[in-house]
Image (cartoon, rainbow, N blue to C red):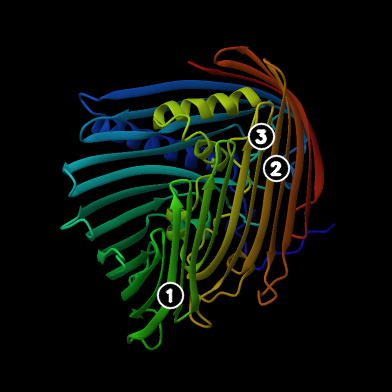
Amino acid sequence: MATMPRKRSRVEGGSRLPTAAQRWRHHSSAIGNCLATAVAVSLSAVPARAERIDVEPWVTARVTASDNAGLGLSTASRDVITDVIAGVRVRAEGARLSLVGSASLESFLYARHTQGNDIVPSVDLTGRWVGVERFLFVEASVRTTQSHIDPFGPGLSATSTENNTTLTQYRFSPVIESDPSSTLHFRARSDNTTTKDYGLASADIDAVDSAYFGFHTISLERDPVPLGWRLEAERSDTRYQGELVSLVTDVSRALVNVAVTDTAYVGLRVGVERSNFLVDDGWTSVYGGQASWRPSERTNFALAVEHRFFGNGVNLSFTHRMPWLSWDVRASRNLDTTPRSIFSVAPTNNVAALLDAILTTRFPNPADRANQVQDIISRQGLPTSTATAIPILAERLSVAENVSGGVSFLGVRNTLALTLFATRTSDALEDGPLATGEADTNNIQHGATLAYALRLTPTATAGLTVNYSRIKSLDTATASERTTDSSVSAHMTFQLATKTSAMFGASQRRLSSNVVPSGHETTAFALLDHRF
């Protein structure tokens, strides 16, 4: 199918995608900054006299033979790719200091040079300091996320990095928590984030470089026994690089809650808000309601709906876990900007999170439970990441509607994980510089991942993973664009030693698009994983 011309190019004077040299300069700068920050966070957050420190280095080597490496690119061709990942997981806990997270580097080497060799960093570290016991806390974190340069192009895969960019977000969050009485609670939190792309040659992404997002909240709450209330105020602040004016929204609310039972309450909320990017930047009304149900530590339901200037705002979450099954359902509708979406994006290792929920009762200690989860993933060849919505990297102000769900089953021989998502992104304003109407910022995405593993013997497991994702521009967008990416992978995993496993498998992938070249790819791969 012939590709549809784009309204604008992602890289001035040529291809939308950066050259191999540009990607290497971008990633090498990102790697240096990520590692420097990771070391700084580690050194500052690891307790001098930690009660417990768990450090687990690991390495994975993978060789993939592809008949169409770089699917979706004009340079797609046969190649053999060697992929080596070296990383470390750490959990350190002390009386006042703690550090939890992981860091890794993943290299891609192309035998036939169909693409430029590349290194992709991944860091997710959070340090926490208790300044004053049960009153003052400070959190600091660094997190890198992989995203598409062109949301309608193919993303990072085992055989291609061409359309991938590494974003790093740094966060500093002072927190005050105080309980004047058993039913009265005071909370104040200030999340301050800076998102960097380290100068990748792309006009859209350069607009996100050094973007700031701040989310500041303060509240005073009385528990519903049976009548409760909460007074709260919040400010969200987005600043794009080169822009003199921040995008600021202030909201103040008063909530009243009534306990229906010992584990459930319902309530109403009223308030006011103002935003500096509206033609009329005066105060407007906010009103709605909320409900909560927590019958046990295993089940939690929360819903909040309110009318705001952009329509209805919604936040819903439902989680439930059993010794062999866990559920996680979430939905939201809210204002969104690029740095805010990266700040609030769910972790891609949601398979690990679902398994972690199942094992909570059996392994109450978080460190022991994390080790068990990694054992299951490694032994059964489960994916650590699943299909998720593509972050939109542009200078934008959007209304984002998100729905996601996940379920996992952990049996004696069978393990299954299913995740789904749907995201609709549209311009929040009808006119002005942030109302572009373009497909990149006005689209709907759907995706799903199904992972199944069957334990054949104590040391051998068969597995199947199916992925599907689709992005399509809204009917109101200036151009009609769509891309569908689906794949199926089958593998056999063998436990060679306690912390060593090998995997052999094959996959089939199909890409259908009116933006980038369509086609299909068949691969065969072999993998060796070892945790020290």
In this rendered view, identify the residue nearer to me: 441 or 299.
299
Residue 341 in the image: state x and y as whole percent: 47, 58
Specify the amino acid type for callout 3: Ala
Q: Name the residue under label 2.
A: 450
| CA separation in Å, label 3 and label 2 | 18 Å
**Is the C-beta separation of discs 1 and 2 under 8 Å?**
no
Q: Dot 2: few (<14), some (14–19), or many (≥20) neighbours within 10 Å?
A: many
Please name the residue shown 42% across and 39% down the image: 124
Please name the residue shown 64% across and 38% down the image: 409
In this view, the mark in front (3 or 2): 2
Element class at badge 3: loop
Q: Mark 1 points at which residue?
A: 289
Q: Mark 3 points at which residue?
A: 158
Please name the residue shown 82% across and 47% down the image: 519
In this rendered view, identify the residue nearer to me: 392 or 113.
392
Specify the amino acid type for callout 2: Leu
Disc 3 or 2, which lies upstream in sequence?
Answer: 3
